[in-house]
Image (cartoon, rainbow, N blue to C red):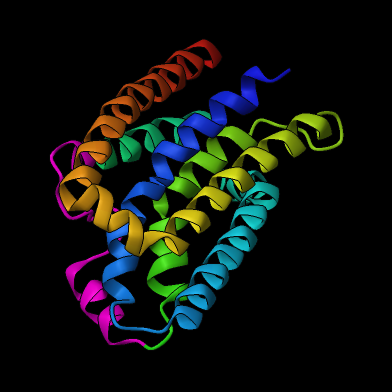
Amino acid sequence: MLEQPLKFFIVFFVVVEPISLIPLFSGLTSGATRQYKRRMAVKAVGVSAVILVLFALGGAPFLGLMGISLEAFRIFGGLLLFLLALEMVFARESGTRTSSSEAAESRRRADISVFPLAFPFITGPGALATLLLWFGPLQLLRQGALFGELLAAAGLVLAVALVLMLLADPLMRVIGVTGANVASRLLGVVLGALAVQFVLDGLRRAFAVA
């Protein structure tokens, strides 16, 4: 019963990569008050939760409306996650999350909770693709328990992200930027293997249907 939620938790944790939020949040809120930091972190996670639920409930019907099969999205989602994994492994600025112009804009904004924290850093393209890959095949009425368990697993990842953002400053003093990059590279290797598996599963099911 716990195999699917546990597997989803690991995949979603690696994709969201809460550890990468530590230096990001610390830099964006440098010099701000403790109340401001807490408000931005809580609001960012709240907005991310709303986006998560909306995609979990409406993602698959939207794909059906657009005439896109789950197999096609599984292949594309796997490729997208593979690109994200490469960026994590080589410690490059993530083009799958935000562009340089968007990053510059975020540094000028007073409210950073919705952009860039909630989107695209917490619930970016990789996270949304993961949601559709896992929730898309589920039938809510027949698999309501599993649906709820996956939502709970995603909520747990968001809770971890919230805790790490609230503790960003002391954690940065302990692990530093280098430590965060090392953890990101290790998670990137795992994500790369999972991404390849998504592509292989998509190809296998597509040819099986054909």
Residue that appears at 51% across and 73% down: 38
Q: Is residue 68 visible?
A: no
Q: Is residue 117 magenta?
A: no
> Does 57 sit above or below residue 48?
above
Q: Nearest the camera: 27 or 84?
A: 27
Specify the quadrant of the image occupied by residue 67.
Answer: top right
Residue that appears at 63% across and 37% down: 136
Q: Quadrant of the N terminus?
A: top right
- The segment highlighted magenta reads 86-109
Q: Is residue 87 magenta?
A: yes
Q: Position of residue 164 (x, y in %)?
A: 44, 54
Q: Position of residue 187 (x, y in %)?
A: 31, 33
> Does 128 sit above or below residue 116?
above
Left or right: residue 131 compared with residue 98? right
Q: Nearest the camera: 63 or 78?
A: 78
Residue that appears at 13% across and 39% down: 90
> Does 27 sit above or below residue 49?
below
> Does 188 sit above or below residue 95?
above
